[in-house]
Every structure is written in C-alpha cells, then in structure tokens.
Image (spheres, rainbow, N blue to C red):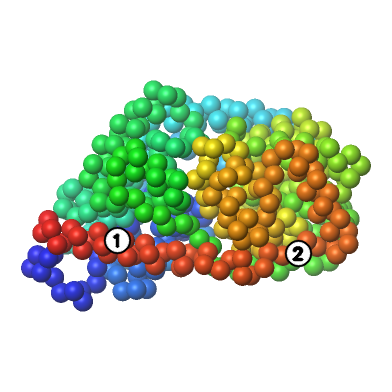
C-alpha cells in the first residue's frame, strides 16, 4: 500500500532530528523535545535522532527511551566552547583572578577558528554517523515527515540526506538563522558566502521552514524563496522556587541590606553583541546610591562582564557566580527584584526572540532589556507590561532610581501579573506546528511521491 492509499486513521510517523535533546540541559534541546512530546501525546508515531547520550544531563527525556536513537559524533572533536567548571569564577568581581580573562580570550580565539574552518559548524562530525545510525537502527520504520531543529545546522544535512534516501519530505526549524540575518556567529565575509551557498544547496529539497519571528521568516523567504512559517518559542511549565526565606543566604550571602535592589542576569554574554557595559556604567552614575544596587551574573565566565565591571569601577555592586546548575539559575531568577536581558541594540537584531525571555517571564519578575527598542522582544515586553527597554546609561540610571524608590517603599518590586503570560506557554505555540507537519506530509502523499 502506498502512502497515498494509507488508512487516514493510521498515526502519522514523525522523525525529529536534533543534535540537542534531553537529558541535555541546553536551551536548544527544549523546543524539539516539547514538539516530540506533544506529537506523541496526540497519537503520532514519533522517533528522535540525536547526538546526546542517555547519561549526558539531568533533564527528563520527554519520550520513551526506546523511541530515541542516540548516535555519537565521530571522530570525537574537542569542544570549542567548554564552559568553566561550576563555582570556578564565583565570588565578588573584585576578588576573581585576571587569569579568567586570559582563558576567556583564548577560548574565543579557538571558537573563532573553529567557526571559520568547520563546515557547516563544529558538529559536522555527526552527519555521517547520524545517517548511518538511523538506517541501522530504525529497521523498517519510515517517517511520513522529518523535522530538524538547528542550530547546529549539521542536522539540516542529516535531515536532507535521510529525506532523499527515504523519499519523504523534511521541514527545517530555525531557532536561529544560519548564513543570513545572523550576526552572532564569529565568521568572516568569505566564510559567510560559503555558508550561504551551502545553505541554499541544502534547502533545495526542503518542504517548508519554521522560525521564531516574522522578521526572521521574511529573511528566509527573501534569501532562499522557501515557504516559511512562524512558531514562537514558549514558556516551559516547571516549578518556580519560592522566594528565599530569612534563613537562606541566597547567592550573595547575608551581607546585602533588605533595601538593596537586586538584579540578575543568567546565561551567556556574547562579546560585542550582548553588552552589560551600559548597565554597569549606569550603576556608576548613581553615586552613593550605587551601594544600594547589586547585580548577579550567573553563567559562563568568558571575561566580558569582568572587564566591563573593572572599567566601570563597580566591583562592589556585582557578583559573578560563573556556571550554575539549572535549579540554581531558576532560584536566582525567582529571588531577584528584576531580571536583566542583554540583547543587541541594532536593527539587525529586530527579529531575535531569545528563549531566555520566556524563562524570565515565568519567574514573574520585571525585565530590564538592553537591546533594540523596535525589536520583537522589546515589543513583547511592552505589550505584556512585563518590562522596559533602556540602552543609554543615564536612562538606565533613572530606571534604577525609580525601582530603588519602590523597593524602599514596599520592600519588593511588583511581580509581573499572571495574565501577562497568557498564550505564551509552549503548548500554546506548538499545536500549530503539528498542523504544519501534517499539511506537509499530506501534500507529499497526495503528490504520490
């Protein structure tokens, strides 16, 4: 029986290809994991092809392990951006050794070299093993549609190869862009030109693409002429810890007065693109009031924030925790008065909708965004009443003074109301995603391919 003759009640078969997948705790694993789990709950026959081993993290796997094909990259390459060990960079900024800056600079040079030389990315050593591993493991099982999520975009090559061999359609999910409209990757103009040719070649066979915002979707349509849909990321439901009690020292200990305004940033800081400098300069502008503001940075210590702290001369107002566990990151967000979201203040960042914004929203703390005021992230915060966008140090200092007054008067900044999150949960977004995949599979079957 051909696909066009199959029983319409037979479950559609979906193969999700994602280099990142639970138990990995990376942000890149969340979207494909949530989609696979939703498809399974709605009766789809789901398989997952990933590079992550069953013991490589602490996140629960959202689908039964027998449905996951785990294929390790080969040959093994060194990780180009290995994070610092937890606690290695903890403590006040003024007391951390300058060696971290040197290590951070060396690491960035290695990353830059890797991004220039490895096509399409440092995960290229997964392409052939993934294709072979699926063919040897899947047996007679054949998908009706393949969904691949990137970056890394080596997975797109895996999906395109499997789709060609199995004669099925594939859909490319862009959590971020590859060769066009993406200014975060460290690549030269010649390398970007090579990437663009490679991306165009891979996308010749794609049935449809999906990305996280309309500006990014329009970029893909213009550059490659591909049918592109928009499905935002969303809030992942998980327990939010209760605020710390009097007996809990919190991330910076007991030494902060109750009236101190605490801000927190969790995650990676991109050099030259997501800059904490204006915030730190704003704290310096507060004069004596700078002692009443404290910012916690939790994430890989690549030396960028440390250098900015030293330039601004505000070491007493900053704590650098280095890499922390996901649980501690959530606790830091829940305990802070406000959360700092660092993005790029440039029109080229208009379509970036970082997944971190949804984590922050779920913590119900007001957000201070440093980024492009006309971008989709800033618009979301304005429309939802969940935060403000400030970029000039004087404007940031004025906002901090306003929050200091509220903190002194009430003891805590007002929480973001629950109704600000309506429609932004992951399940609110992904229902439409399954419709897109069903439509793609249906068109392919109707064409008798």
Height in image: 248 above or below 9?
A: above
Question: Circle 1 — which element?
Answer: helix
Residue 240 can be seen, yes or no: yes
Residue 71 can be seen, yes or no: no
Residue in front for this viewpoint, 245 or 186: 186
Number of other residues with Cα within 10 Å of mark 1, as a class: few under 14, some 14 to 19, many 20 or more: many
> Residue 162 at what x, y percent from top left?
22, 49
Quarter the N terminus occupies: bottom left
Horizontal side of 152 relative to 200 (left or right) equals: right
Q: Residue at x 80, y 48 (%)?
A: 400
Quarter the C terminus occupies: bottom left
Query: What residue would you read off at disc 1?
Result: 437
Q: Residue at x 76, y 57 (%)?
A: 337
Could you say which quadrant of the image residue 272 lies in? top right
Q: Residue furthest top?
A: 190
Reading the chain from its start, which is encountered first: label 1 or label 2? 2
Query: What residue would you read off at disc 2?
Result: 414
Q: Residue furthest bottom?
A: 9
Horizontal side of 281 relative to 34 (left or right) equals: right
């Amino acid at each position: 029986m051909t696909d066009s003759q199959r029983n319409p009640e037979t479950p559609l078969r979906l193969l999700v290809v994602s280099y990142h997948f639970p138990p990995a705790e990376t942000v890149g694993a969340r979207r494909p994991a949530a989609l696979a789990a939703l498809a399974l709950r709605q009766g789809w026959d789901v398989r997952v092809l990933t590079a992550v081993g069953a013991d490589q993290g602490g996140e629960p796997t959202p689908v039964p392990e027998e449905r996951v094909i785990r294929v390790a990259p080969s040959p093994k390459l060194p990780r180009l951006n290995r994070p610092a060990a937890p606690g290695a960079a903890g403590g006040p900024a003024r007391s951390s050794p300058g060696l971290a800056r040197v290590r951070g600079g060396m690491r960035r040079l290695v990353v830059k070299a890797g991004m220039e030389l490895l096509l399409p990315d440092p995960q290229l050593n997964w392409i052939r093993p993934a294709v072979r591993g699926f063919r040897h493991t899947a047996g007679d099982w054949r998908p009706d549609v393949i969904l691949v999520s990137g970056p890394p975009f080596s997975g797109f090559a895996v999906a395109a190869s499997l789709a060609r061999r199995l004669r099925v359609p594939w859909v490319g999910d862009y959590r971020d862009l590859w060769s066009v409209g993406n200014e975060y990757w460290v690549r030269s103009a010649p390398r970007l030109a090579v990437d663009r040719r490679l991306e165009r070649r891979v996308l010749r066979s794609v049935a449809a693409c999906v990305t996280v915002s309309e500006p990014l979707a329009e970029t893909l349509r213009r550059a490659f002429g591909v049918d592109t849909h928009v499905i935002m990321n969303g809030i992942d439901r998980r327990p939010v810890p209760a605020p710390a009690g009097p007996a809990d020292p919190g991330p910076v200990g007991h030494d902060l007065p109750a009236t101190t305004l605490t801000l927190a940033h969790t995650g990676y800081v991109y050099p030259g693109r997501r800059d904490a400098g204006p915030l730190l300069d704003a704290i310096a502008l507060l004069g004596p009031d700078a002692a009443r503001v404290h910012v916690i940075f939790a994430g890989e210590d690549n030396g960028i924030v440390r250098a900015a702290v030293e330039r601004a001369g505000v070491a007493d107002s900053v704590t650098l925790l280095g890499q922390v566990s996901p649980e501690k990151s959530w606790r830091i967000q829940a305990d802070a008065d406000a959360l700092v979201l660092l993005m790029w203040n440039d029109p080229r960042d208009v379509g970036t909708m970082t997944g971190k914004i949804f984590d922050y929203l779920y913590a119900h703390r007001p957000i201070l965004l440093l980024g492009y005021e006309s971008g989709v992230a800033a618009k979301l915060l304005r429309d939802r009443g969940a935060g403000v966008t400030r970029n000039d140090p004087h404007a940031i200092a004025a906002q901090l003074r306003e929050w200091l007054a509220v903190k002194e008067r009430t003891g805590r900044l007002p929480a973001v109301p629950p109704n600000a999150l309506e429609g932004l949960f992951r399940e609110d977004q992904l229902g439409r995603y399954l419709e897109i995949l069903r439509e793609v599979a249906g068109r392919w079957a109707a064409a008798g391919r």
